[in-house]
Amino acid sequence: MSTRQVDTSGFGAYAGPVLRDGHSYRFEIAAHHLNADDRLHGGMMMTLAAIMLADAAREAAAEKQPGAKVGALSLNCDFVSAGEKGDIVEGLTEVTRATRTVLFISGELRASGRILMTATGVYSLKDAGTR
Amino acid sequence: MRRPLPSPRDVAAPAGWRAVELHDPFEAHVGPLFTRDGGEGERIFGFIVDERHVNEDGEAHEGMMLTFADAFLGHAANRAAEKGCVTLSMQASFLRPARTGEFVECHMRVERKTRAIIFVSGRFNVGDEDMMTATSLWKVLGER
């Protein structure tokens, strides 16, 4: 299966790269992603969740309503365990529900099978140009 | 204390603000971040949205907003606990976007403090307009 970079926007590219292969996401923790205790920074972990969940939301929106725009309404992140430099973080997402106007997405991040974060997000779905 | 880390970009502090001394590599990477005294012991934090921080629509990326929130809600938790804290959970609502060039401010409030857990909320605004609210839970290291 082919690997591609997701979210190549300013921050997605600056904090990433986050790669996608089929339904799974992949990210390698580098020195500049850490906090002062040499663990993956909480902000970067939430950034990964934000990138993955938004990517899944855009994909679900494209299937439902081609050309529609997706915007984040809320994001909830639980910090289950810490990540360290060199760890490969793997992510999975799931569309919990997609209505005509709102998308519910959930996801989790793991490293070596250990769960790092669970996240849920709510996204708005709007016709192109109305945002 | 270790020496503060430099940020890759030079951004002048707005009048009345000064750069925060950052010790977390990822905060330095997205910085500089600014602070000023809000009076009555309050400390206010802020950053100027630049093209590193935005999504494809030129609006502050949720990841950047959550990084900013984690840094300074964490600062409030550490200060309340007088010890190091780690994030347990964070919930954010995105009220409106912030665009390139806008200055985002964060006002934090400690909602409750127990020996082991600190509850911190944050309100984020651009000028007079609220743009994000966040609530968070922090674990005080070494306490149970």
Image (tube, coloured by chain):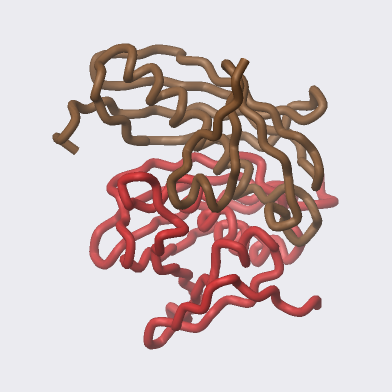
Chain colours: A brown, B red
A76, above or below A39, in the image: above
Using the image, determine if residue A115 lies above or below residue B96. Answer: above
Residue closest to the eye, A30 or B129: A30
Q: Is residue A16 visible?
A: yes
Dividing the picture into quadrants, the one containing residue A126 is: top left
- Residue B136, above or below A36: above
Residue B23: name its quadrant: bottom right
Q: Where is residue A20 in the image (x, y as percent from the top left)?
A: 58, 26
Q: Residue furthest front?
A: A2
Residue A108 visible, this angle: no
* Residue drawn at (77%, 41%) of the image: A83
Residue drawn at x 62%, y 34% is: A78
Image-based side of B116 in relation to A51, left or right: right
Q: Looking at the image, which residue sits at the far right?
A: B142
Question: Count the marks: how many?
Answer: 0
Q: Where is residue B79 in the image (x, y as percent from the top left)?
A: 65, 66
Which residue is found at the position 44% from the left and 31% from the top? A54
Point out the residue furthest to the left here.
A130
x and y, in percent, of residue A25 in the image: 61, 27
Residue shown at 76%/79% (left/top)?
Answer: B3
Screen quadrant of the N terminus of chain B: bottom right
Left or right: residue B7 versus residue A54 is: right
**A3 vs A44: above or below:** above
